[in-house]
Image (cartoon, coloured by chain):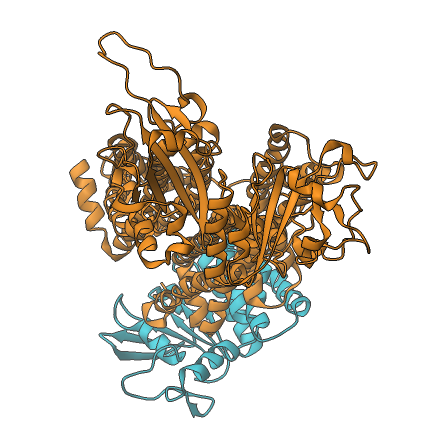
């Protein structure tokens, strides 16, 4: 029976081969996407795992006195360790200072031994940067000589900027942030939510969830496409199966024959899908969805994962194909029962309305206080809207199509409207994958645009370099002189931490104090009242305070009751260095500030501080655009397949209509109306729902008004629609061929 | 052929009856010979003009499967009028008039799948005649019907054609159907071999 099934599969004529090719292609795309998503999750974990050693000295790995363990002759020699984070021209640099206390000190991955005093090891990208950048802009920060590069085991990403500087024990023990450790961390940054240590690595769980959603968002349209392809030329296949029943085949044997066909196509598709993944791998590795590129080898599959895909997908495709034919029962005399799906009812819009109402409620009353509460508030609403769109889709399609057909006098509109309203499930099925992808994509893009857009308010002093002091203490005399002496520096302003007794307002103690002479050099931070020497100030730079430096230019700060001479004895909160904005000067300032005031987190420009964290969001936006464009194209393929299936079903009435003088253009109009109208209406409804959900979310969560996405989003949607339309119009020659007078017999 | 005349084209399967009908209706262009309609050649007209001719001056009735499944019976009948640009309410009103005439009362809103073979064929007949064409081309119009239903359809076709003065070209291999014609020809191996006039034999 299996052999017969295989023979029928390959000898079923041109239509059968086309159907099998479409199923195989859809499976190949689906497997390619699925495997890419799984390998993306693996890659994220692999990359994150390589960040683990940069967590050394934090959390559970902090130093504990060495204890002799049975079987171990001696405890290891502890290692002095200091981890800091720095910036060069907008790129993060990881910096580790180490000093071994003995020959058994732990060695970080990528090293043969702990670097000795005065030795500097750098990642390949960092070594290149050190070689090509003047020392006063970068190299001077480290005070050591480059002696080698860090091995691959220590490099989380291909382009990572990383330095490890060796010191003497006595030198580092007194250094900033130095701690004693007795082992190198192997804990993934995910374990502390991606926010431990100096913030290297990420919380991979979030990325895995996003990749899971992306994979699902793309897989759904592919499954729909497989289902549609199975129904292609179903009538002819049913005739063949009926003939077999007539000569004695049992229903079970017929079911096996039909399953063999689908499984053969799915197996070919699965093999091709792995090939697609193999070809795409180098390109996918360059997509920085964790914020950094991947090594191609990171995108790999476990043996079990590969086996599950290789077996699971053909099985799933076979089941999908079987389900697509479940309404048909083949008897020896042909198809005896073709169940007509019941008409969709109006209750189907209720879940959609409930989802919108749920999000609206939080938009009105505001967000819950805890992040868990916020998740519990928004997630059900968004899921309800997604489910609601799919549930309401057939009813909306039917309602729209009925409206279209009821009053029209145009034959094309009448026929297309009637066909859609007769079986709205079929009309909607082809585009239901698209509606979810477009809803998620549009909502995500709009939300990201709003978050990023509200953060991007670069002021006129965006290049001003800011060094926050994370452990405020008074500055040594003249320590900032080298900074002020750099040509191109306009002024150095120090903001001191106000003592609690110097309250000038009744709204609590002011956070900072500044001398009016220095404030006059940075007018974007506001100004002093006439005659004042010292004012209380609250500079708003970076973090969640988005206002930006420029909005403070008009501020007149309250006078502080303190002589200017007293400031020098106060702990420093922040140093601001205004400059000419050139990269060379900014990096010279950064280097000088690092040496004068070493901190866990190095100096940033105002723009860098304000944009912190929005770069990753921008990459998610790219990902959302990819999802939208791909799902539009796949939806176009599904539509083309269902157009072809619909044409085959109506080959006779259409070709006879054409014989009676109906122009081909009108038949084309019918096809276009049956497909393009639902496609466009769905695109508008899905994008609109996505924007509405995003608006309700940003209103509730951030109390902001949604910013619509930029031109790139519309271009992506437009390009996807154009591709879909091109795919649909590719069925026109088929329409021409099967309805041509030469191909028709009247009897 | 004269206006209102009924011609039967007979012959065995594969003899070329349908090809002859396609040539006469301007669907196919003959390799040789001429097709004249209302004093002009139609075999030399471009496809667009022949399509317009088929739409505006000719009607067609085939053996089966000619109704658009999505449309109701009355919409199927009104289709040629809608294609000719008539307003929907006018077209439907003219289409409904044919239902009483063909004994199809009450079936106006049925879909093609809800009609019996004889009913569907009568609806197709109404569609072929509704635009009052000059010529109706009928290819085995009773081929899928039992003899009683076949007779009903032929009665209706011949009566309606004579009332409207419509010429009918009827392809059939059934002598009982051919008996409704004024003249009949027999096609064998692509050639017209016999021409008889009703009552002459």
Image quadrant assignment for residue A607: bottom right
Residue extending farthest to the top is A70
Work out whether A104 lies above or below A257: above
Residue A348 placement, left or right of A174? right
Q: Is residue B135 visible?
A: yes
- For the C terminus of chain A, the image quarter is bottom left
Of the pair A409 and A195, the residue shown nearer to us: A195
- For the N terminus of chain A, the image quarter is top left
Image quadrant assignment for residue A567: top right
Residue A111 placement, left or right of A59? left
Residue at coordinates 63% horizontally, 41% vertically from top-left? A352
Residue extending farthest to the bottom is B39
Chain in cyan (letter): B
Give the mark count.
Answer: 0
Of the pair A348 and B68, the residue shown nearer to us: A348
Of the pair A152 and A644, the residue shown nearer to us: A152
Residue A644 placement, left or right of A527? left
Instruction: Point out residue A552 in the picture as x, y percentages from the top left corner.
Output: 72, 54
Work out whether A223 lies above or below A734: above
Instruction: Point out residue A653 in the picture as x, y percentages from the top left corner.
Output: 44, 62
Chain in orange (letter): A
Q: Is residue A446 visible?
A: no
Work out whether B20 lies above or below B125: below
Instruction: Point out residue B46 in the picture as x, y percentages from the top left corner.
Output: 40, 86
Instruction: Point out residue A223 in the picture as x, y percentages from the top left corner.
Output: 39, 43
Residue at coordinates 37% horizontally, 89% vertically from top-left? B44
């Amino acid at each position: 029976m299996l052999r017969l099934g295989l023979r029928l599969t390959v000898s079923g004529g041109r239509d059968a081969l086309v159907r099998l090719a479409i199923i195989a292609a859809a499976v190949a795309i689906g497997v390619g996407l699925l495997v890419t998503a799984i390998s993306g999750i693996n890659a994220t974990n692999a990359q994150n795992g390589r960040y683990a050693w940069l967590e050394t000295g934090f959390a559970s790995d902090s130093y504990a006195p060495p204890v002799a363990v049975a079987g171990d002759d001696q405890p290891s020699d502890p290692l002095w360790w200091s981890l800091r984070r720095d910036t060069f021209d907008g790129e993060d640099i990881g910096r580790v200072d180490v000093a071994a206390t003995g020959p058994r000190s732990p060695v970080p991955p990528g090293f043969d031994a702990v670097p000795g005093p005065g030795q500097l090891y750098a990642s390949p990208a960092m070594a290149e940067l050190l070689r090509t950048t003047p020392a006063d802009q970068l190299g001077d920060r480290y005070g050591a000589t480059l002696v080698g590069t860090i091995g691959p085991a220590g490099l989380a990403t291909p382009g990572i900027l990383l330095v490890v500087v060796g010191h003497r024990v006595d030198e580092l023990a007194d250094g900033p942030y130095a701690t004693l450790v007795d082992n190198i961390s192997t804990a993934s940054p995910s374990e502390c939510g991606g926010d431990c240590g100096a913030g290297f690595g990420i919380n991979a769980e979030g990325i895995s969830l996003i990749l899971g959603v992306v994979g699902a968002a793309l897989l759904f349209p592919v499954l729909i496409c497989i289902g549609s392809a199975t129904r292609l030329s179903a009538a002819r296949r049913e005739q063949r199966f009926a003939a077999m029943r007539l000569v004695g085949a049992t229903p079970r044997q017929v079911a096996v024959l039909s399953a063999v066909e689908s499984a053969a196509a799915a197996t070919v598709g699965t093999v091709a899908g792995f090939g697609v993944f193999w070809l795409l791998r180098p390109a996918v590795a360059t997509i920085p969805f964790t914020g950094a590129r991947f090594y191609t080898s990171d995108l790999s599959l476990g043996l079990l994962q590969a086996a599950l895909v290789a077996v699971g997908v053909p099985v799933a495709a076979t089941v999908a194909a079987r389900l697509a034919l479940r309404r048909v029962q083949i008897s020896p005399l042909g198809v005896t029962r073709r169940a007509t799906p019941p008409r969709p009812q109006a209750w189907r819009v209720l879940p959609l309305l409930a989802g919108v109402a749920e999000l609206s409620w939080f938009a009105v009353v505001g967000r819950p206080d805890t992040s868990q509460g916020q998740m519990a508030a928004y997630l059900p609403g968004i899921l309800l809207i997604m489910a609601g769109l799919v549930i309401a889709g057939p009813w909306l399609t039917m309602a729209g199509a009925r409206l279209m057909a009821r009053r029209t006098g145009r034959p094309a509109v009448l026929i297309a409207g009637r066909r859609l309203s007769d079986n709205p499930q079929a009309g909607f099925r082809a585009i239901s994958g698209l509606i979810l992808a477009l809803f998620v994509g549009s909502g995500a893009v709009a939300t990201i645009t709003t978050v990023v857009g509200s953060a991007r308010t670069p002021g006129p002093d965006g290049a001003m370099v800011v060094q926050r002091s994370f452990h405020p203490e008074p500055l040594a005399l003249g320590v900032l002189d080298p900074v002020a002496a750099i040509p191109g520096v306009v002024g150095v302003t120090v903001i001191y931490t106000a003592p609690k007794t110097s309250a000038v307002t009744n709204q609590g103690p002011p956070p900072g104090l500044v001398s009016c002479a220095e404030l006059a050099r940075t007018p974007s931070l506001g100004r002093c009242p006439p005659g004042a020497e010292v004012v209380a100030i609250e500079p708003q730079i970076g973090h969640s305070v988005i206002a930006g430096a420029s909005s403070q230019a008009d501020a007149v700060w309250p006078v502080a009751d303190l002589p200017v001479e007293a400031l020098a004895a106060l702990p420093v909160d922040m140093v601001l260095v205004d400059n000419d904005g050139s990269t060379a000067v900014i990096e010279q300032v950064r280097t000088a500030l690092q040496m004068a005031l070493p901190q866990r987190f190095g100096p940033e420009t105002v723009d860098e501080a304000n944009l912190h964290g929005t770069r990753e969001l921008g990459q998610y936006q790219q990902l959302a655009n990819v999802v939208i464009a791909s799902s539009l194209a796949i939806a176009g393929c599904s539509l083309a397949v269902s157009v072809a299936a619909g044409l085959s079903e109506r080959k006779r009435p259409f070709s006879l209509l054409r014989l009676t003088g109906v122009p081909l253009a009108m038949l084309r109009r019918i096809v276009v109306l049956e497909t393009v109208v639902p496609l466009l209406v769905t695109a508008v409804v899905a994008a609109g729902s996505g924007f509405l959900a995003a608006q309700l979310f940003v209103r509730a969560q951030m109390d902001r008004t949604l910013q619509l996405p930029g031109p790139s989003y519309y271009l992506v949607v437009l390009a996807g629609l154009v591709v879909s339309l091109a795919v649909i119009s590719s069925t026109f020659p088929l329409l021409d061929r099967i309805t041509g007078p030469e191909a028709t017999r009247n009897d | 052929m004269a206006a209102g005349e009924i011609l039967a084209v007979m012959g065995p399967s594969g003899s070329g009856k349908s090809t002859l009908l396609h040539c006469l209706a301007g669907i196919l262009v003959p390799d040789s010979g001429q097709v004249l309609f209302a004093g002009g050649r139609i075999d030399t007209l471009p496809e667009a003009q022949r399509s317009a001719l088929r739409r505006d001056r000719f009607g067609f009735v085939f053996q089966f499967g000619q109704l658009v499944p999505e449309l109701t019976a009355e919409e199927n009948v009104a289709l040629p009028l809608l294609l000719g640009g008539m307003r929907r309410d006018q077209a439907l009103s003219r289409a409904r008039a044919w239902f009483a005439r063909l004994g199809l009362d009450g079936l106006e809103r049925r879909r093609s799948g809800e009609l019996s073979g004889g009913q569907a064929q009568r609806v197709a007949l109404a569609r072929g005649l509704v635009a009052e064409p000059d010529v109706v081309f009928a290819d085995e119009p009773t081929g899928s019907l039992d003899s009683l239903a076949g007779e009903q359809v032929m009665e209706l076709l011949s009566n309606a054609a004579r009332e409207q003065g419509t010429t009918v070209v009827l392809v059939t291999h059934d002598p009982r159907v051919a008996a409704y014609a004024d003249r009949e020809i027999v096609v064998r191996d692509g050639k017209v071999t016999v021409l008889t006039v009703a009552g002459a034999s």
